[in-house]
Each structure stands twice: as structure tokens, then as C-alpha cells.
Image (cartoon, grey):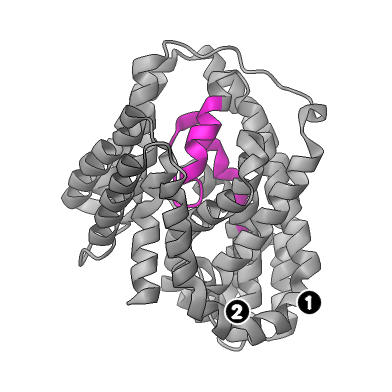
Amino acid sequence: MLVIAIIAGIICGVVTGLTPGIHVNLISATLVSVSPIIIPIAGVLPACCFIIAMATTHSFLDALPSVFLGAPEAATALGVLPGHRYLLKGQGLMAVKLTIIGSLGSLILSGLLFPFLLPLVAWGYPYLQSVIGYLLAAIALFMILRDRKMLWAGFIFLLSGLLGYLVLNLPGLENPLFPLLSGLFGVATLLISLNESSSLPPQQDLPYTDVDGKRTLQAFGSGTFSGFITAVLPGIGAATAAVLSMQITRKLGDHGFMVLMGGIGTANFVLSLVTLQALGKARNGALVAVKTLFEGVQLSHILVFLCTAMVAGGVAAVLALRLGRSFAKLMSRLPYKTVLLCVIGLIILLTPVLSGVVGVLILVTSTAVGLLPAIKKVSRTQAMGCLLVPVMVYFLL
């Protein structure tokens, strides 16, 4: 039953990873709602392992729609632009390979660090929680000051921050991040590309010898650290952690950044198991579901979950690479502008389904804000104020 649960979780993780708008949290919540039927048949531990396998697989596969379609979610929003640059150079598959390397490297490193982090988290959590708000404020200020157009950078940061704060605090709004991030980083990027590009070059399958080993090691080390921060602290998401890492590892370029983006998502989920065991706190929707299903989680169960994540990650890496090759071949054959229009249309159609009519208004507004960095030649990371400002308010006020 455990093997069947892991296989089923991997399959569902592929579906959620490749389908914009369908998230692991949605499947996990659905499983919890039908648990009175499922648990007597499958058992609690297999049901939890299903969720672990699904979430781990999702963290490997979610880069594909981000790179090839420009359809982001919270974990991959910042990766849209570098991934799109790779795609326009005919190297979209290399961007996917780099995220796979980052995910797999961070998965292995997270597993190795797991026994050392358990006591460290229990001891250091109160100290880290007390300074994170000030750290994020300092990083935000540094992001603005280092931009060549500081005034516009500050304006875009504050504007996106105000938008993010309002959206995330709207009562009754479901899936607020979908229209917010799809507009800022998805539709805005696609509209710019639609205006500038008429076709895609043939997508190359570059060998792994083109991967820069030194930058890759630095990137997935940084990704693992950032994933650890997101796993421990409430309110800190993968994209926020990516902004933090970018200030530390400025010389990694697009190559290192794609590795970093792959590593953060996977490390975030795996190291959330540390937080669950050390603090008894669930830092993401999947582990909230696990905690709801299995109240008496012990260290032995956490180790089973860790092994499940390792197995699912190994399988997911192979699947992501094969599906990436299929995506690359398909993108080379399709009219690029037609693909862009279809993706924009898909996002517009999904928005009212996932977030209602208010979501459409948010999508339009966030797209307008997302176009500003390109128009004013300001770093796209300034638009991450949409997540940084609400988190800073959470910690400082």
C-alpha cells in the first residue's frame, strides 16, 4: 500500500506541476475532506506518504510551465524572466536541466543536513524570528538603492507592495497569489515577448558539460539555505527567499539563478519536515494536511516521509527531464505568438474559476504594474514587493 501511495503521489505531482492553477494544497485539502473514506482502506501512513511524494514531485515539475509557458506560481515567479531568456536563445531545455540539478542537489543536501538541523531549529527559532522583519527591510532598501533608477525602483516596489498587501488581505478571496503573480510575472512578461518576438529558435539539447560546476554548487547551497529559512519562518515563501539569496549571490547570473530557483522549492518542502518534528509546526499546505491526518507524528514517521521524498525526487528528476525534452520539441514546432496568446487566454480563463470576478480585476491591475519595470528599465525583482511588504508588515507590526 505504501508503494502504491508513493506511485500515485508521483503521478498527481506531475499533474499539479504541469498544470497552472492546480496546486498541491488543493489535492491535499481534497484528500483530507475524503479521509474518512480513504483512511480505513489505505491507512494513515500511506495517505501521508502520498502527499509527501506529490509535493516533492511538484517541486521538480513546476519549472516546466514557468520556462516554456511563462505561467508562474509563487515558487517560480522570479524564474519566469531568466527562464524566458533561455527559451528565446533556444536553450529552454537547459533552463529546465538547471532547475532539476538545483532540486536534486538540494534534496540530497537537505537529507544530509536533516539530523543536524533538528536541534539547531529548536534552539535558534526564537532568535531568528525576532530579527527577520528587520533583515527583510534592509534587503528591500538595498534592492532599491542598488538600482540605477532608484526613484522608479522605490515607486514600483511600494506600488507592488501595496497591491500585494491589499490582495492578500481581501476577505473571502480564494487563491489570491494566482492572479497577483500571474499578472506581475506571467502575463506582463508574455505581453512584452509578444510585442518583441515573432518566433522561437530551435530548442537545443545542450550537454551537461555546459553546466558551470562552481556556480551550480554555490547556487544549490544558497537554495538549500533559503529553503531552510522558508521552512522555519512563517510568512516567508520561496520567492521571498529567492530575493534574499540574490542579494548574497549576485555573480551567479541566469545560470546560477535557475539552479537556485529549483533548489529553493525542493529544500523548502523537505526541510519543512524538520520544522514539523522540532517545533510541531506545519509551514505549508501539504504538511498541514499531513498533520491533520496524522496527529501523533513521531520521528520514525518523519524518517519514512524523508525516505519517501528521496524516492519521489529521484523519479521526478527523470520525469522532468523527459517531459522537458517533449516540451522543447513541441515549442519548436508551434507558432510562438499563437502559443503566447493561448497561454494568456488560459490564465484569463482560469482566473475567474480560481479567484472569482475580483481575481480578474487583480489580474488586470497586477499586469499593469508588472509592465512598469520593463517600460522604465528597472529590475523586475522590485515587483517582489508584492510579497516582501506583507511579510515585513507581519513581522514588524
Residue where numbered disc 1 is placed: 115
**Which x, y percent locates residue 68?**
52, 29
Return the residue nearer the eye: 12 or 275: 275
In the rendered image, is residue 3 in sight? Answer: no
Q: Which quarter of the rendering shows the N terminus? A: bottom right
Eyeballing the image, is 246 above or below 229? above
Is 361 placed left or right of 135 in the picture? left
Q: Is residue 278 above or below residue 286?
A: below
Q: Mark 2 = which residue?
A: 276
Measured in 3D between alpha carbons, the distance from the residue under mark 1 to the one under mark 2, in whole angstroms, is 13 Å
Q: Position of residue 15 (x, y in %)?
A: 52, 46
Say whether marks 1 and 2 touch (CB < 8 Å).
Answer: no
| Residue 326 in the image, given as x and y percentages of width and height | 62, 26
Instruction: Give the percent coordinates (x, y) of residue 372.
Output: 29, 35
The residue closer to the viewer here, 163 or 267, is: 163
Residue depicted at x 63% and y 82%: 124
User: Is residue 69 located in the magenta-colored stretch of the structure?
Assistant: yes
Q: Amino acid at mark 1?
A: Pro
Please say whether residue 211 is one of the residues in the magenta stretch.
Answer: no
Secondary element under disc 1, as helix, strand or loop, is helix
Secondary structure found at label 2 = helix
Magenta-tinted stretch: 56-85
Give the residue drawn at x 48%, y 58%. 139
What amino acid is labelled 2 in the image? Answer: Leu
Q: Who's the residue at 57% across and 49% down the image?
A: 246
Q: Main secondary structure of the magenta part?
A: helix
- Image vertical order of residue 285 relative to residue 246, above or below: below
Residue 264 showing in the rendered view: yes
